[in-house]
Image (cartoon, grey):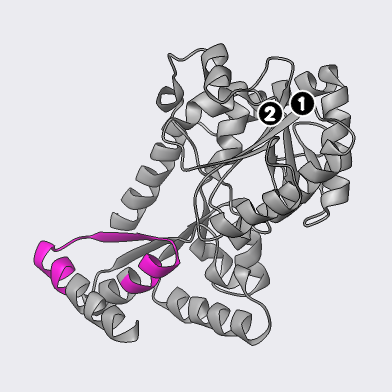
Amino acid sequence: HITKDILLVLKLRAHLKEHKYDIVHAHSSKAGLTFRLAARIAKIDTIIYTPHCFYFQSKSGVRRWFFSLAEKLLGIITTQLVVSCNEKDWALKHNLVSSDKLTVINNAINNYDYQSNVSVQNIKKRLDIEDSHCIVGAVGRLCKQKDLTTFIYAAHQILLQDKNVIFIIAGDGELSIQLDNLITKLNIKQNVLLLGYVEEITNLYQIFDLFVSTSLWEGLPYTLLEAMYFNLPIVASDIGYGDVLVDNYNAVLFTPTDYKQLAVKIIKLIKNKSVRERIGQKSYQTFGNFKFSTFIEEHEKLYLSKLN
């Protein structure tokens, strides 16, 4: 919507000039584009950008080249990029900006946002899940990036061997109908629950026995931090989480899109409770590295350094 985008940039420019901001901090691809352009036109000195994954990561061929070029051009007018370790690697690999323009501030969550007064038994009862079932959970937008098709195919493989497992997908998105049709086609609807958007997500994490992330690309998603907070063993696609997730230490990693390998690794954890508990404990210990207070302090430090 090029016309609407131009009008939006002009509207933002007027707002920024009226209020005389010292810093603009834009988040994600679309807002990152429009706000950075508006801030530049409004002659704001400090423009900060947090990508939450670069848009070109979802593209290939000419489209990847085009959108990475757009990021490079926008990088010229950007004072600083706030990135995860994963995103820093992508930025350097594609020469988006010089290394001195990259500041690593990993995401964090506030523990107090994840308190619940609902018991595990009541949550399971609402979902008609028996205590004897092992529950494997996934949380995220139902989109290409999250690759929940791989999760569903892995579930199908596991259910051929063990019917005592329930798979839960919490989230909404453009692939909702497509994923629901796949679950129906594989005849696993009784064991794979597609819940849609869940407001009280804390309640679900409490009943998971393990957490799975099948993403094709990520920065550091909040869902991994949430799983860590709830002491969950994590099974995740090996997409460059650096020292955040270490295979067979605080997580189990698998090759992206390889649903058979994913199924094998989930089954091993299902069958070995002691290993699940050990990896879950290590994931919780890792969570201690991502304090919300530190997240705030690092942003304050960055802002003040630019003002000074």
Asked if the residue under mark 1 is in contact with the one under mark 2, i.e. CB atoms within 8 Å, the reply is: yes
Secondary structure of the residue carrying numbered label 1: helix
Q: Quadrant of residue 65?
A: bottom right
Q: Quadrant of the N terminus?
A: bottom left
- The amino acid marked with disc number 1 is Ile
Residue under the point 72% across and 48% down: 152
Q: Which mark is residue 123?
A: none
- The amino acid marked with disc number 2 is Ser
Q: Quadrant of residue 110?
A: top left
Which stretch appears magenta? 14-34
Residue 109 placed where, x, y %? 47, 34
**Relative to 192, 177 lies left or right:** left
Q: Which mark is residue 279?
A: 1
Residue 225 placed where, x, y %? 57, 35
**Relative to 187, 248 lies left or right:** right
Residue under the point 21% across and 75% down: 42
Residue under the point 75% across and 46% down: 187
> Does residue 27 lie above or below 128 as drawn?
below
- Foreground residue, 182 or 34? 182
In this view, which residue lies farthest toward the left? 18
Q: Which mark is residue 283?
A: 2
Residue under the point 60% across and 67% down: 91
Q: Quadrant of residue 226?
A: top right
Residue 125 placed where, x, y %? 56, 17
